[in-house]
Amino acid sequence: MFRGPRRTLPRVRFRFRHRSGFLAVNKLLTLAAVLVIGQGCASTPSRYAAAVKEVDARQVANCTLISTVTGRSLIGGSSVAATNAIVDVKEQASGLGATHVVMQNVDEGSMYSPATATAKAYKCN
């Protein structure tokens, strides 16, 4: 029984290059996915940071200024990133023994720069 010449499909070969091609695209897509997923995750403050109250300057008139603290969020460009930076400020303030913070500046940052928050930390009796 003669079946004729055997036909095969042509082979497709992918070339993985370091600087361009599929490998670079895969890395870029993975990084983009991590950034998108990370944008929606607000950090949870510790119980010590949760005890630090965010107030205005009038409410800390009789308190002792401890220090100026700056907090950061690794990913910027959203209100979640700004919230994470504020949580970082409260974490640092609680580590210094502060009971209250007065926020001075909150910057959401951008896709290329982290969100930052600056506050004065006070200890009130």
Image (cartoon, rainbow, N blue to C red):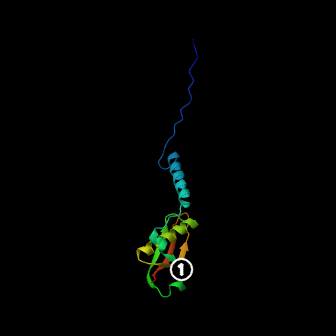
Compare residues 62 and 14 and report the one nearer the observer.
Answer: 62
Q: Position of residue 32 (x, y in %)?
A: 54, 55
Residue with the mark numbered 1: 55
Determine the residue positioned at 54% across, 86% down: 58
Q: Position of residue 82 (x, y in %)?
A: 54, 69
Determine the residue positioned at 54% across, 56% down: 37
Residue 59 shows up from this direction: yes
Instruction: Give the mark count.
Output: 1
Determine the residue positioned at 49% across, 71% down: 50
User: Of the residues shown, which amino acid type is indicated by label 1?
Assistant: Val
Q: Is residue 29 above or below residue 14?
A: below
Q: Position of residue 48 (x, y in %)?
A: 44, 71
Q: Looking at the figure, which quarter contains the C terminus?
A: bottom left
Determine the residue positioned at 44% across, 75% down: 93
Q: Is residue 72 above or below residue 31?
A: below
Q: Position of residue 18 (x, y in %)?
A: 47, 48
Compare residues 72 and 66 and report the one nearer the observer.
Answer: 66
